[in-house]
Image (cartoon, rainbow, N blue to C red):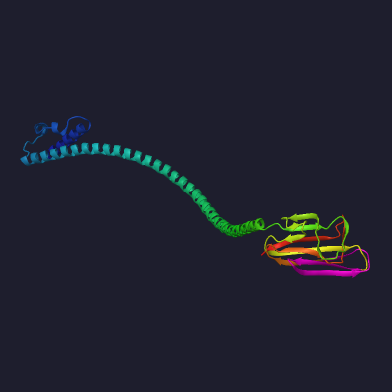
Amino acid sequence: MRRAEAFLVLLLCLYWTGAQGESGGLTGNDITQTEIQSEILGVKSTSDQTNITPDIWAELKELRDMAIEHSVELRNSKSKMEKLEQENTAIQARLTASEHKNEVLENVVKELQRENTVLEARMNTSENEVVKLKIESADLLDRVTSFEDKNKVLEARMNASENEVEELKRQNADQPKVAFSLGLTDNGLIGPFDTDITLKFSKVITNFGQVYSPSTGLFTAPVRGAYYFSFTTLDGRSNVFRRVYLYRNDKRVLFSYNYSSSHRESVSNSLVLQLEKGDVVYLVLPAGHSVFDDASDFTSFNGFLLFPL
């Protein structure tokens, strides 16, 4: 019975010691074995029995050490708990900040996604426009190439035409200007004569190249070529033959005549001659024939160069 009472006293001491340690009072290190023994001895003095065995002291010491150790562990655990609570508060604050940041990031991501969608749509539109422009550019390039080819053909033709024009100009410049148109006289009737005479056309209407001589009545070819000649004669008499000859050099090449009883009837003819340079052409009035001319140029002689040969 006394042993139980001593044990209860020891437990009360341990409880009081732990309470003092938690409230800032005495620590476990301040409680000495002597104090505990004194408390136990006080209990012993009030007790009727004083024969506690040494084993109880050893157990009490062990219990004291355990109580001190548990008290220190409780204080350390409280410090750790406070530190953990502070860390937990900091972590919660960081989590709150992270959640806010995540929300902001989510909004940014959503905005970027929206902008990306808009940009993708614009990119698709731009790509379609680029494809369309490429097609149009290819079509324009084909058309330009076609125009360039046509222009090259036209340019070649133009160059050829210009060359031909230049050649014609050169030929025309090199070609002598040969043409004449003549009237015989203003004196009326010429002839008849006893011999053949060369008609000398004294009225020069045109004489390009000065190829006809009114003083001799001869046309002289300046170049080898084809020449055209024509003439018309009028006789003022009636009931007579009307004749005229065209000569090249000393050879008669054309003989024209008619007979009429009417008054003032004409004779006309024309031909093309190939002449060498220096050949002469003239009209001859046969003996016994006459011609008539006045200001009306009833009797005329004409000729010109067709082309050189």
Give me the residue at 37% from left, 39% from top.
97
Q: Position of residue 104 (x, y in %)?
A: 42, 42
Farthest top residue? 25
Q: Is 118 displayed left or right of 296 in the figure?
A: left
**Of residues 209 and 215, the one drawn nearer to the viewer in this rendering:** 215
**Of residues 209 and 29, the one drawn nearer to the viewer in this rendering:** 209
Q: Is residue 87 above or below residue 245?
A: above
**Of residues 93 and 132, the one drawn nearer to the viewer in this rendering:** 132
Q: Is 219 displayed left or right of 45 in the figure?
A: right
Q: Is residue 173 visible?
A: yes
Give me the residue at 32% from left, 38% from top.
90
Quadrant location of residue 164? Answer: bottom right
Q: Is residue 4 visible?
A: no
Give me the residue at 40% from left, 44% from top.
102
State which region is magenta. 240-268
Quadrant containing the C terminus is bottom right
Quadrant location of residue 144? Answer: bottom right
Q: Position of residue 290 (x, y in %)?
A: 87, 63
Asked whether 267 falls inside the magenta stretch, the response is yes
Q: Is 203 displayed left or right of 90 in the figure?
A: right
How many discs appear? 0
